């Protein structure tokens, strides 16, 4: 299988990378399971460091898209459906105002907190897009490396 993938990579690299990017970004944005396996698959097409950077950018971009969807499209619905959870998270963000960067980084590093929940709750709790994107990019590094 490795030889087949290598041959395919040589002949259709641009098409494969474009399709991979679209698929990974879509799955990350809409919280469709399978990104972990796609992250493993990229190792057959790219060396380790470029693959790590590529996955980091795609993961961050997908999470940012999810954040923006929550802020601009789903906010009213999320407040209606999960007001207690959002209020709890908003209070936690307020408690950690001075160390918000490290609090969000911890939420990303510790796998006990679902990524999708952090993605949709952060904009409703008033977290800035800049802080969210930076902690997402840095916080996913340990998960990408393993």
Image (cartoon, rainbow, N blue to C red):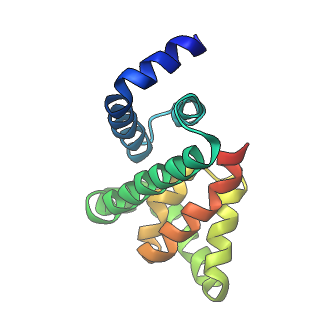
Residue at 33% x, 34% y: name it. Answer: 14
* Residue 22 pos. (x, y %): 33, 38
**Residue 5 percent coordinates (x, y):** 51, 17
Residue lying at 37% horizontally and 34% vertically, measured from the top left: 23
48 sits to left or right of 82: right
Q: Is residue 123 left or right of residue 95?
A: left
Which residue: 73% across, 56% down?
Answer: 110
Q: Residue furthest bottom?
A: 98
84 vs 100, nearest the viewer: 100
Q: Give the image quarter of residue 19.
A: top left
Q: Position of residue 50 (x, y in %)?
A: 55, 48
Q: Position of residue 131 (x, y in %)?
A: 51, 75
Q: Which image quarter is the C terminus in?
A: top right
Let me know if residue 123 appears in the view: yes
How many labels, in total?
Answer: 0
Identify the residue at image location x=58%, y=10%.
Answer: 1
- Relative vertical location of residue 63 with respect to residue 11 in this rendering, above or below: below
Asked whether, in this view, residue 130 is left or right of residue 91, the answer is left
Between 130 and 94, the one nearer to me in the picture: 130
Q: Nearer the viewer, residue 92 or 64?
A: 64
Q: Is residue 126 visible?
A: no
């Amino acid at each position: 299988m490795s030889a087949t993938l290598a041959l395919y990579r040589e002949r259709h690299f641009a098409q494969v990378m474009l399709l991979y990017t679209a698929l990974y970004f879509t799955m990350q944005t809409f919280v469709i399971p399978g990104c972990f396996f796609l992250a493993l698959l990229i190792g057959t097409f790219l060396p380790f460091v470029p693959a790590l950077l590529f996955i980091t950018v795609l993961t961050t971009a997908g999470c940012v898209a999810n954040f923006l969807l929550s802020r601009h499209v789903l906010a009213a619905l999320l407040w209606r459906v999960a007001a207690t959870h959002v209020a709890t998270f908003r209070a936690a963000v307020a408690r950690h105002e001075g160390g918000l960067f490290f609090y969000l980084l911890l939420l990303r590093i510790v796998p006990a907190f679902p990524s999708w929940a952090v993605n949709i709750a952060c904009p409703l709790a008033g977290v800035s897009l800049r802080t969210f994107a930076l902690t997402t990019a840095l916080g996913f590094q340990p998960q990408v490396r393993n």
